[in-house]
Amino acid sequence: MAMEHFNNRDSSVVPELGTDPLMENCSVYFPIDDMDAADTTTLPNQVSRFIMNYPKSHDRCAIFGPFYDEPALEAGVISYGLNVPVITHGAEDNRFAMERQFPNVFRTNVHLHAMGDLAISALRSKGRTDFLNVIYSTHPYSIQHSETINNAAKEQGFKRIYHHGIAPPYVGMEPGRSAWYAMENVKKNTFRTIFVALHDAIEQISFVADAAEEYGLISPDYVWMFSGNIDFDYALYGSGNSNVTKLLKGAAFMRQMDGFDVDPEGDHFLKSWKSQDAETVATVQGLNPILADEPGYYNPPEDYFQVITPMRGSGFMYDAVIAQGMGACWAEANFVAGGGGNNQKRRTQEEADTKSSLAAVEGDKTGNEEVGGGKSNGRIAARGGTRRAQYLRPSSSARSPASTKVVPADSSHQGRTLKEVKYSRKPNMVGISEITFTGATGKVQFKESKRYYKNRNRRVFTYGLYNIQEVQEDEGSR
């Protein structure tokens, strides 16, 4: 859907596709009939397996996704070799902000620092201003959450912050591993505000809930807040654990919000999603032929887009596609403005290559994503679009822009000092950082600062604070 909108300059979701002067003379298009996708779930090895075994991987112009941090880290490493951008729509790892580590990775969501600031601000707005317990699983992702919350709480005036790590097998009373040991210490320190950062919530939340119930910590006296990577439906209805349900009712959740979460009635992305018809469904099936007896087979109904709600992160994926397209248009316009490309038959590094195409890697568990609007083993595509995408890539003789070169300060073999590593940014990557548009998730603008040019600007980003409550109805409760 995003690629089709870009190709047709359809402004139903992004007004700038029809009004921005940048788009008037842009010759960039996505080759919808020459793309591929895969469901990586949360496994990083699925990313490398898909991309490196794909025969056209070196002709791809971008990687969209994955949603989860670990697969996105893998995609970021691979993109360095392929010299293409990765635009993730859900990964929050703070390391992606660093140009030295991941020069090619952008994201349409924001990093954990922004989440931490907002989470603590939300707690303060509820009168929790002094003391805090942080429970985290001993995994790099959760540790980052813990450190982020700690820094934000200190900056906003919290006096005491206690951290409690948990790790397999979670039971027993071993410090740093046992959920029961953590809850016993929460009970002893009497601090009644608890932030929980879990890496694998499906595995870990039952231990946290059982231990919290045993120590009497699930009560109105305690405020629980969770990081946003929890599957609500599973936690509430699929875990089979009544303590989990009891813990999560009334708890708060901090997570990024799609536009259709904020305003489903007025959301342009959701309206466009629901306007897709049976022709789109048929196109997706034709582009993704999986036999009925093969794994991942899915036969969507003709009214799929009317009965299925876009999954979490769909709007952020849509904006990732638009950012890539508009970034390439910016680079093309910048090249032309510099006087290049008028009479050349072969364009060089700053030009569009009409042979390029696109790869998307998606990390959602179900493989359902809005790029093509269909669901079938994570492979997705969209209808329409016959013109080939023009894209910026280096000529065969050009040095890889993502490469680094360490040069000695002098010719001496001893006592050498190394100059600072410099990264040459590809024109379309510069373009992504320069563009601004109103997308499915609100105003999309990168360049949070001169140093963090790949970060989405947190000042124009919407986070949501959820609270789960039981609603009584005439026919019972839900």
Image (spheres, rainbow, N blue to C red):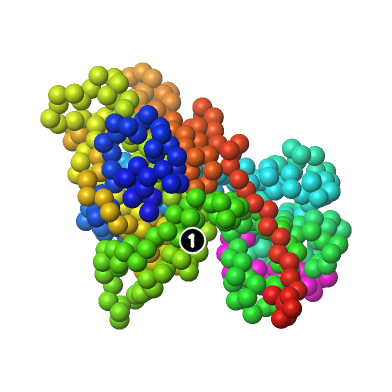
- Label 1 SS: loop
| Residue 24 in magenta stretch | no
Q: Which residue is mark 1?
A: 310
Does residue 99 appear anywhere in the picture?
no
What range is drawn magenta here?
198-216
User: Image point 68% across, 45% down: which residue?
Assistant: 118
Where residue 384 sits in the image (x, y, percent)?
28, 54
Question: What kind of residue is marked 1?
Answer: Pro
Q: Is residue 424 above or below residue 1?
A: above
Q: Main secondary structure of the magenta part?
A: helix
255 vs 94: above or below: below
The residue depicted at 14 percent of the width and 31 percent of the height is 346
Mark 1, Cα crowd under 10 Å, few <14 / some 14-19 / many 20+, is some
Q: Nearer the viewer, residue 380 or 383?
A: 383
| Residue located at (77% from left, 69% from top) | 212
Does residue 463 sit above or below 200 in this rendering? above
Is residue 212 part of the magenta span, yes or no? yes
Q: Position of residue 465 (x, y in %)?
A: 68, 53
- Relative placement, left or right, of 70 versus 228 is left
